[in-house]
Amino acid sequence: VGKLNRLSTLRGILKELKTTGSKNEATTFLLNKYKSNQITDGKHCREADALNHDASSYYCLLRSTREYKELCDRYHSGEGSTEGAAKRVGLKLPNLYKEGTKE
Amino acid sequence: MFSIFRIQRCSKVCCIWSQVKHFSGKEKFYKEARICHSDGGFEINLDNRKLRTPNGNIVKLPTESLAQAVSVEWNNQNKVLKLDQMPLTTLCFSAVENKPTISAKTLVSSCFNYLHTDTILCRINEPPELEKFQSERWDPMVNWLMKRHSIQVTPSSGFAMPVISENAEPVLSRYLLSYNYWSIIGFERMVSSLKSLIVPLALVDREISVEEAVSLSRLELEYQISKWGNIAWHHDIELAESRMKTAAAVMFIQLCSEDSKTERYREALKSL
């Protein structure tokens, strides 16, 4: 169960790095770190647990930064704010007066 | 009474809000962020320019892993820079700017003072369901702290202050001072954002995950949300932000403490 967990965390991190268009340098660095710390399964190693915890933390950092960004863009974008705000509470804006148009 | 503690704490660490304003909203002025060795440390190059704090000081990072992670933040920026979405960079700026003026001892003392009003130690009696919930989730953390550091703490409720043993201050201060300055900056930020000393200690010791740490620090809020409903544009943003900041702080600490000799020493102390 340990290895599956580790792989899914790594996969998650790589996916996050890919979606943000990060340079390959960081990805290569990360993969090298994983390779150099490969430990055969079956051995309980405190170091492996520590690295797995760090990987999970990093995955959480990347994921929640992206979520924070998406939520800010969605709710605090400030574009079409009046109309968007009205829509959010289920109302429509009244017809606005336009100068120069004949009524 | 509690608010006086908070005001004292806030004024101690250099306010970086002005730095956030300085960078945020600026257009992305570089194509690529890369790292480079420099005199026992690492620096970030934004195309040809070295990364500097808003006050103009060069940011020199202690480890390569941290430098890589910071470069990822800068490469993730789109057309406009948003420093509030770059928590590792913010911590780096804080470390560089505060090192000449604010000592490690001051930061550690500020962290320790949070223990007196630690989230985990201040319980609510009403409603009984919440009291039980707090006990279930927080008591294990209290027990862990007492076992791990050989100190005594007793939670309290109402206006009573938690009881903390005499040896707590020297023991915890010595522990925190065993970390380097940059790591202590990370600790201070995490402690003040989670409003607890115990939760960051457990997180850095890898006892709990980031998600669990954040959940413990907002227990009452989660209880209320379960009763009254979740407001997406407020609660979700707050949750994502809290996770982002906490994950950044713990990564910052782990990446800054990568000096393997210190790590092994600390691990050895654990098994005693």
Image (cartoon, rainbow, N blue to C red):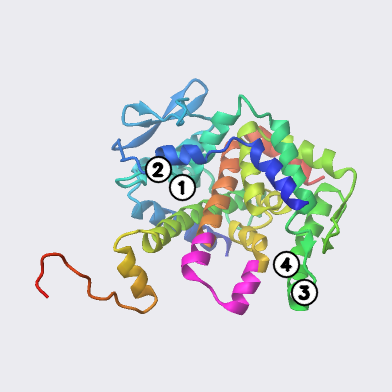
- Relative depth, front residue between A35 and B170: B170
Query: What label does residue B58 carry, if any?
Result: none
Which stretch did the figure color magenta? B221-238
The residue wearing badge 4 is B137
**Badges 4 and 2: C-beta atoms under 8 Å apart?**
no
The residue wearing badge 1 is B84
Query: Which chain is disc 2 placed on?
Result: B
The residue wearing badge 2 is B24
The residue wearing badge 3 is B126
Of the numbered discs 4 and 2, the one sitting upstream in the chain is 2
Question: x, y percentage for residue B191?
Answer: 67, 48
Q: Disc 4 vs disc 3: which is toward the camera? A: 3
Type of amino acid at the residue the image marks with label 4: Arg
- Tell me the residue at 62%/50% (across/down): B193
- Relative depth, front residue between B105 and B231: B231
Q: CA distance from mark 3 to mark 1?
A: 36 Å
Of the numbered discs 4 and 3, the one sitting upstream in the chain is 3
Label 3: how many Cα within 10 Å (few below 14, some 14–19, many 20+): few
Query: Which chain is disc 3 placed on?
Result: B
**Badges 1 and 2: C-beta atoms under 8 Å apart?**
yes
- Circle 3 SS class: loop
Question: x, y percentage for residue B147?
Answer: 83, 53
- Circle 4 SS class: helix
Of the numbered discs 4 and 1, the one sitting upstream in the chain is 1
Q: CA distance from mark 3 to mark 2?
A: 43 Å
Residue B134 among those drawn in magenta: no
